[in-house]
Image: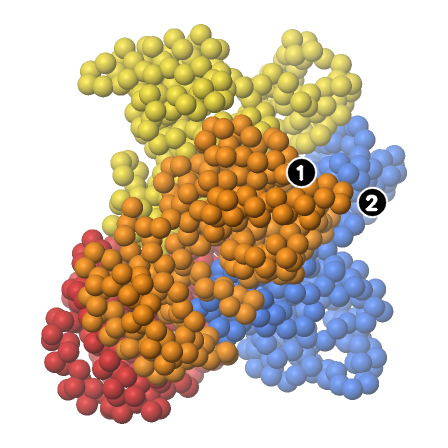
Chain colours: A blue, B orange, C red, D yellow
Amino acid sequence: MKNTAILLIDCPDRKGIVAAVGEFLYRHDANILHADQHQDAERSLFLMRVEWDRKDFALEPGEFTRKFAPLAERFAMRWRLEISSLPHRIALFVSKFDHCLVDLLYRQQSGELPCEIPLIVSNHPAAERWADFYKVPFHVVPVEGDNKVAAERKQLELLHEHQIDLVVLARYMQVLSKDFVARYPRRIINVHHSFLPAFMGAKPYHRAFERGVKLIGATSHYVTEDLDEGPIIEQEVVRVSHRDGLEDLLQKGRDLEKMVLSRAVRWHIDHRILAYAHKTVVFD
Amino acid sequence: MKNTAILLIDCPDRKGIVAAVGEFLYRHDANILHADQHQDAERSLFLMRVEWDRKDFALEPGEFTRKFAPLAERFAMRWRLEISSLPHRIALFVSKFDHCLVDLLYRQQSGELPCEIPLIVSNHPAAERWADFYKVPFHVVPVEGDNKVAAERKQLELLHEHQIDLVVLARYMQVLSKDFVARYPRRIINVHHSFLPAFMGAKPYHRAFERGVKLIGATSHYVTEDLDEGPIIEQEVVRVSHRDGLEDLLQKGRDLEKMVLSRAVRWHIDHRILAYAHKTVVFD
Amino acid sequence: MKNTAILLIDCPDRKGIVAAVGEFLYRHDANILHADQHQDAERSLFLMRVEWDRKDFALEPGEFTRKFAPLAERFAMRWRLEISSLPHRIALFVSKFDHCLVDLLYRQQSGELPCEIPLIVSNHPAAERWADFYKVPFHVVPVEGDNKVAAERKQLELLHEHQIDLVVLARYMQVLSKDFVARYPRRIINVHHSFLPAFMGAKPYHRAFERGVKLIGATSHYVTEDLDEGPIIEQEVVRVSHRDGLEDLLQKGRDLEKMVLSRAVRWHIDHRILAYAHKTVVFD
Amino acid sequence: MKNTAILLIDCPDRKGIVAAVGEFLYRHDANILHADQHQDAERSLFLMRVEWDRKDFALEPGEFTRKFAPLAERFAMRWRLEISSLPHRIALFVSKFDHCLVDLLYRQQSGELPCEIPLIVSNHPAAERWADFYKVPFHVVPVEGDNKVAAERKQLELLHEHQIDLVVLARYMQVLSKDFVARYPRRIINVHHSFLPAFMGAKPYHRAFERGVKLIGATSHYVTEDLDEGPIIEQEVVRVSHRDGLEDLLQKGRDLEKMVLSRAVRWHIDHRILAYAHKTVVFD
């Protein structure tokens, strides 16, 4: 596993930021591997991601925080430092459709997603065999009738207990409460099975089929309190024609969903995403 | 120019249609070049397109109509016969953005679009130099304030005078009245600069930029009385990122618009499109 | 499982084929669900696929063969009749990279690929855990040094024993002998990890990376005696940039490989592919 | 027209480059608009593009060169400074197919390509009407039999006379000599009508049609002395099927050619491309 540090910054755009950050890192012997920045001209915002090798780097995270603070204050930065060797701990939430779950588990185990998956939560027992195969603790938390508050309380306990820092809704078909979402800001990723903002809400493939669109899509996004309105991370489409029935749309869509969700998770755990306003910057 | 006949059929689906049509054409010596059909299982509809060489074909259009009528009646067919050597006469409507207009004129002249373009109508004088270059009659019909009824009357006169059978709205930014649309059912093609049904209505690129989508699109469709709700003919998308400003979206979008509009026109003049319900079948 | 019959025809193109086939099927009460045809103008070939419901159909396969023979002879047809309720029996061959294997097993089990997979053959033991999970007989047949003849004999025995009618090379890295290939004409499907004919042969991603291409691809094709020269069934590409290292190409490529191989298998088992000359017609 | 300066750097990768460049620009009051960098890990290369507003910037180009030299020397940089307000002067070379020529002229005139086009050279007279319409000097330089040396001498004179700094081969079907190419290193852009390295050389669409590929492509690249081997700038593909005849491939291909060539020209004149080894970095 690589041993890098990643610094993510957003602040008002003004002169001298690049010079100051570059000088700071150079002074403490950082060997920069990647650096990328973006100016949002409309909002006069400066956004930056720098990744460096920790091998020769002089500062431990605590020290970094202390020494970087004055510079950060000078430019009114919001910032965070991430350490690649501390892998994300991810909980997968799933309902009946398990293709995204199975896809993510395989990618994690084959080394494509450098993270830990210590928890699967479902409102159905069906996914248990996958949890067993991959040796991941599995919890059924039914969500029915009026037990939603209790169910979410149980889910939050599980997240806390397993020290989860990212929740991935892998075709989890229950709507999370505002309260739940507020606990994990920018740390819940969902896949919606349409090309947002087209076909928000329920049964998007059915509505796409009815409308006679010539391409269908899927979208991964951070979950905010407004359903299907969170910052979009990734989208993908595939061509369909009159020859495609509803079943074909569902089948083609599953491949899209796996792609956009797995990319979003990869970028999140690589600390490549900066979400601001209703948008994301994905430093690729 | 090729000399073929195209038969387009839709009717309730039942046994024996293919056999009956095949036998009829064979009996009159048709050399079939293409045949394609589609069953809409939900609506129990049968749709068919057959194209044959007229060289050895025994029947003139009038004769065909008379002899085919009993068969058509037996299967309750809606049908039409098209003759490829009678090219479409197309009117191009344009406002200020002329990229689609210029693209269509070039494609027509280079032989890619086998049709005639005897009329360009605009609410601005800017496109006149293109009309001059391509030697196409050009008419400015301003649409301002409360003169819309008069303007449309003038436009309809021009269409009638030039024997137009297809109106192509090549980024024409005025909304046509229901009355106008009703005169040219399934014979007005529009390009909308978004991936419908996302961003219906005005300023779609601006809204796509605001929303932070990762792909933008364009859509060509038949115009019906509900704006942006007509049967979709073609859609295309292109990837965008946070690096793309609004200007980049506009620029990338122009290429999409040219593609989806020119494909729609090509398929229409090749008699490849059957529109039904809110959808199209494009026999490719 | 649906109960349909599929007739696949290729023959010299001449008048009356559609009428004759249509009449034959109608006479025996076929309810046609799909019909598609293609004329290869260069080779004067006619190719057709018809699928009908067997529910009311009067003829059993043996009877069909007897009664269809005169018509087939009249038009010099090569033809075959397939029965959808007799599922394909597929053997998966795999080496170390198991992403295509895992993908196909999941798709089969979830109902997306209506076929049976009674055999997995590998030259490595690594895939056994998947075979166990999916309860598929698994055989390690090492191919090393000079035992290739013996290894293929063993493989052919396994194919025979399990009554296999389609071999899928799911990233199987050994070259099959001409003799082996000749036993399963048009019944071995391979995935090549490049956009053929670019980067034929070994290490295509490495060479794509070296060449600095801006898109990478994958190709599924029937195996013929000329390596990477068989009829192409499906191809797909994805965009790459200078930011993508070799590892990124490999990772993006895996998703392409899964897509093109699974589509090829689906179309093969749906009897949608007619291979002729060095090409395929995929009736979609 | 915007008034920015662009600094392009490549040098051996080592610590402190970003800090040094950032500090230098900050000291002279540059307001950085875009900065992007890339590390080629294999070759231990560092590549960078910085663009800043010249409004408050303290240094004129000559002064910049003098003051930047020590820093450049310290890091063994190859570098160049470009001034956006000094537009490229482009010569378009064309043969009979004029779709790329027409496309580029339109994009230039509509403001999409901020450059000057003071020269069109062709070995055929056909394109003259476009030159007239766009008021661009047009020269026919026939290339026949053994006059190639003389023809190239004439072309070079024209380039010199019109102070051309970029030659765009817009479907120019003559092969340039090594000598000619050596005069304009990384300053000749060609479009090849295939997805390189597939179908290098002549008649790529014919060969793609013969091979039965399922996608066709086009490639824009810098011209080097090895034909079709120069650094690739952009590639694009489009899906084809058995229904597409050779004519359809040619038609679909034209749209690809226009896209990849116009993008390459745009990126070149925006100074976004760094070519090294056989590759390009396109800073987007």
Front in this rendered view, residue C87 or C136: C87
Please indicate, yes or no, whether residue C266 appears anywhere in the rendered image: yes
Measured from the top left, where is residue C164 in percent x and y? 27, 79
Front in this rendered view, residue D238 or D229: D238
**Relative to A62, is B136 above or below?**
above
Q: Secondary structure at mark 1?
A: loop
Q: Which residue is mark 1?
A: B142
> With A183 as the anchor, is B193 left or right in this view?
left
For image coordinates 25% across by 73% down, the residue present is: B24
Front in this rendered view, residue C169 or C34: C34
Measured from the top left, where is residue C151 in percent x and y? 23, 70
> With C222 as the anchor, is A280 left or right in this view?
right
Please indicate, yes or no, whether residue A237 appears anywhere in the rendered image: no
Q: Secondary structure at mark 2?
A: strand
Assign the C terminus of chain B to one quadrant of the image. Answer: bottom left
Residue type, numbered disc 1:
Pro
Q: Which residue is mark 2?
A: A78
Residue type, numbered disc 2:
Arg
Corner quadrant of residue C88: bottom left
Measured from the top left, where is residue A221 in percent x and y? 69, 59
> With D71 as the anchor, is C98 left or right in this view?
left
Front in this rendered view, residue D254 or A140: D254
Measured from the top left, where is residue D243 in percent x and y? 33, 57
For image coordinates 65% across by 12% down, the residue present is: D61
Q: Chain of mark 2?
A: A
Number of residues whose C-alpha sits closer than 10 Å to that of mark 2, classed few (under 14), some (14–19) or many (20 or more): few
Q: Nearer the viewer, mark 1 or mark 2?
A: 1
